[in-house]
Image: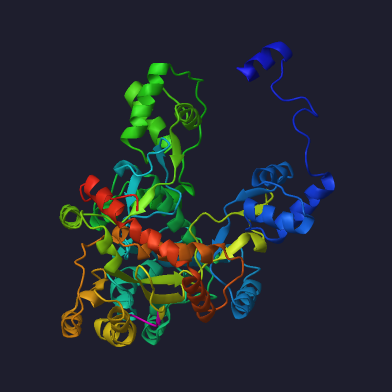
């Protein structure tokens, strides 16, 4: 109403220059602030406010920091993630680029090939659910996510200037023998032989560079294009995989199995054909008439959004067009929902629970619903892994428009398993165990030899009446481990499967992970990471751990109220 009155009275909507509260910072201070933000581009507004207070002795809130940087054009944006490059990688990439700097029409003879994996469930941290304030723990606002490897399909394909190969599905792990038998012999070599003067490109994955594969290429007289390591940015087929992945993510239809994901020709195969034929994947954007919705239409729109809370504004616009026959743009959808208080927020991710999981969790909660002081005798134990580099998709870099590819705006991220440390620990009401570092994979024998005998059993024997808790991981439930517990007369607490929300030690791991993420000092090695994790573990106040123990009755009550489903813990 204020903006409307200002427009009708003064024919303008902006404030007069000089109106509003006076800026605390001068132009010189703003330039200093910009230099600070560009020195550490990943620093948040709160971190910059703390650094500003230390440097100048003047307090400045985080919102003022954001406003000043926005006024200077320095916006927080998503960084680029790239594979880490060593000095040798950079030297070989530069050498390869100099050797091919004069190629023009020669690239039309190259056949680019690669494998890619498309997962059945993929969450990049950008999925949002539409909910009101306070609805965070509603079942429809929770997305279940597997903690193990996600099922999916692995494919192989090749593109040439005028043609493309068939898309092949690869089941299981690909080795050099399978690469020859299932890819090169049936599809790649015939495809190359149909293209006179073709040059075959492949990356330096182990199945591609094995001796048996090199001998096969020599026997078939296949000309290979030398390829530098860690160079997916030089292969155009990587863009094809990225396009297919984006189209799969935008498809509103749920995929029930990997076979259905493979058979879905309207996504993978259609996008593959459209890209290779027309060099585009999206339709041209068109303008439409201006639309105005009534209050009744807004209520209908809210009902649609609450029916499918993960639907994007574009998907809701398409559903609205089908339901009403009236076109409504995605930005109008967002404005209407925001006016109704329905904001797109980050969902909660939880482990998928089957019917049996819920039944057993509810049964366990009913058996322990009357426990109060009994929880003080329980010793909660668990393993956790802390990675050397961790990116949750929420890191931002401050940059101007056009600075996306600057080296300081790029965050290097390994494509394989991230190095880190795996630890074991246990907490009791009045004490905690030593934190143990576990190197390599943990099996039942190593669990007894490296965890139970040297640390867990002596720790339990020092606590009269202690009850030991552990989850249902395979090393914990093996026969040899059960026999060991029986021989040592260790009393175990029965534990339902898929129940990390009932164990307070999971919260301890979360606290350690958050403190590691807030530490601005870079971690150079796994040994240094282990020292930091051990330091945080020893510095945790025992009173905080006791508070977690005191929450156990509330956790059990929440599990009963959820009928064995997900809780807020």
* Residue 321 percent location from the top left of the image: 38, 26
The stretch drawn in magenta includes residue 325: no
* Residue 408 percent location from the top left of the image: 66, 62
Relative side of 10 to 312, left or right: right
Q: Quadrant of the N terminus?
A: top right
* Residue 458 percent location from the top left of the image: 31, 84
Residue span colored magenta: 437-441
Is 226 in front, or is 353? 353
* Residue 329 percent location from the top left of the image: 47, 29
> Which quadrant holds residue 364?
bottom left
Coloring applied to the structure? rainbow
Relative side of 375 to 18, left or right: left
Q: Is residue 226 visible?
A: no
> Which quadrant holds residue 451?
bottom left
> Would you place residue 443 above or below residue 10 in this image?
below
Q: Determine the residue positioned at 29% across, 72% down.
A: 182
> Would you place residue 445 above or below residue 45 in this image?
below
Q: Determine the residue positioned at 37% across, 66% down.
A: 191
Is 374 in front, or is 315? 374
Relative side of 405 to 307, left or right: right
Predominant secondary structure, magenta span: loop
Q: Is residue 14 visible?
A: yes
Q: Determine the residue positioned at 64% across, 20% down.
A: 3
Q: Determine the residue positioned at 34% across, 63% down.
A: 155
Is 401 in front, or is 130? 130
Residue farthest to the top, as pictured: 9
> Which quadrant holds residue 447?
bottom left
> Would you place residue 446 above or below residue 238 in this image?
below
């Amino acid at each position: 109403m204020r903006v409307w009155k200002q427009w009708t009275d003064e024919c303008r909507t902006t404030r007069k220059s000089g109106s509003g509260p006076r800026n605390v910072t001068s132009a010189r201070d703003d330039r200093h602030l910009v230099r600070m933000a560009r020195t550490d581009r990943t620093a948040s507004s709160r971190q910059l406010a703390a650094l500003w207070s230390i440097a100048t002795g003047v307090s400045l809130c985080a919102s003022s920091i954001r406003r000043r940087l926005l006024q200077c054009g320095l916006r927080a944006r998503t960084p680029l993630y790239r594979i880490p490059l060593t000095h040798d990688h950079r030297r070989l990439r530069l050498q390869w680029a100099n050797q091919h700097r004069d190629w023009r029409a020669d690239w039309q003879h190259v056949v680019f090939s690669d494998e890619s994996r498309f997962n059945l469930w993929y969450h990049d941290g950008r999925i949002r659910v539409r909910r009101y304030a306070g609805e965070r723990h509603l079942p429809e606002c929770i997305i279940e996510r597997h903690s193990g490897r996600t099922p999916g399909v692995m494919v192989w394909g090749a593109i040439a200037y005028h043609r493309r190969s068939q898309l092949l599905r690869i089941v299981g792990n690909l080795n050099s023998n399978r690469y020859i038998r299932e890819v090169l012999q049936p599809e790649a070599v015939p495809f190359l032989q149909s293209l006179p003067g073709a040059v075959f490109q492949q990356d330096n994955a182990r199945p591609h560079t094995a001796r048996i594969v090199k001998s096969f290429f020599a026997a078939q007289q296949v000309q290979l294009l030398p390829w530098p390591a860690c160079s997916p940015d030089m292969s155009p087929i990587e863009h094809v995989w990225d396009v297919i992945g984006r189209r799969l993510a935008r498809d509103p239809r749920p995929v029930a199995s990997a076979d259905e994901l493979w058979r879905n020709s309207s996504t993978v195969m259609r996008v593959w054909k459209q890209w290779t034929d027309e060099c585009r994947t999206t339709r041209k954007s068109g303008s439409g008439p201006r639309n105005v919705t009534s209050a009744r239409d807004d209520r209908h729109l809210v009902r649609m959004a609450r029916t499918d809370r993960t639907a994007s504004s574009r998907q809701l616009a398409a559903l609205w067009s089908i339901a009403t026959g009236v076109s409504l743009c995605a930005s109008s959808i967002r404005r209407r929902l925001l006016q109704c208080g329905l904001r797109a927020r980050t969902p909660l991710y939880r482990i998928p629970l089957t019917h049996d999981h819920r039944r057993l969790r509810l049964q366990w909660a009913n058996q322990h619903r009357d426990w109060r002081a009994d929880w003080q005798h329980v010793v909660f134990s668990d393993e956790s892994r802390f990675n050397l580099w961790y990116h949750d998709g929420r890191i931002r870099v401050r940059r101007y428009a056009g600075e996306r590819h600057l080296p300081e705006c790029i965050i290097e991220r390994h494509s394989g398993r991230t190095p880190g440390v795996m630890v074991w620990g246990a907490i009791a009401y009045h004490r905690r165990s030593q934190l143990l570092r576990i190197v390599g994979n943990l099996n039942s024998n190593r669990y007894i030899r490296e965890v139970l005998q040297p640390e867990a059993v002596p720790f339990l024997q020092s606590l009269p009446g202690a009850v030991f808790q552990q989850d249902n991981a395979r090393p914990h439930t093996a026969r040899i481990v059960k026999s060991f517990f029986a021989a040592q007369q260790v009393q175990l607490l029965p534990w339902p499967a898929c129940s990390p929300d009932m164990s307070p030690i999971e919260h301890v791991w979360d606290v350690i992970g958050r403190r590691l993420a807030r530490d601005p000092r870079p971690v150079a090695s796994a040994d240094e990471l282990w020292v930091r994790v051990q330091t945080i573990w020893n510095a945790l106040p025992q009173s905080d751990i006791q508070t977690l123990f005191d929450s156990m009755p509330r956790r059990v009550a929440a599990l009963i109220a959820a009928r064995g489903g997900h809780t807020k813990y």
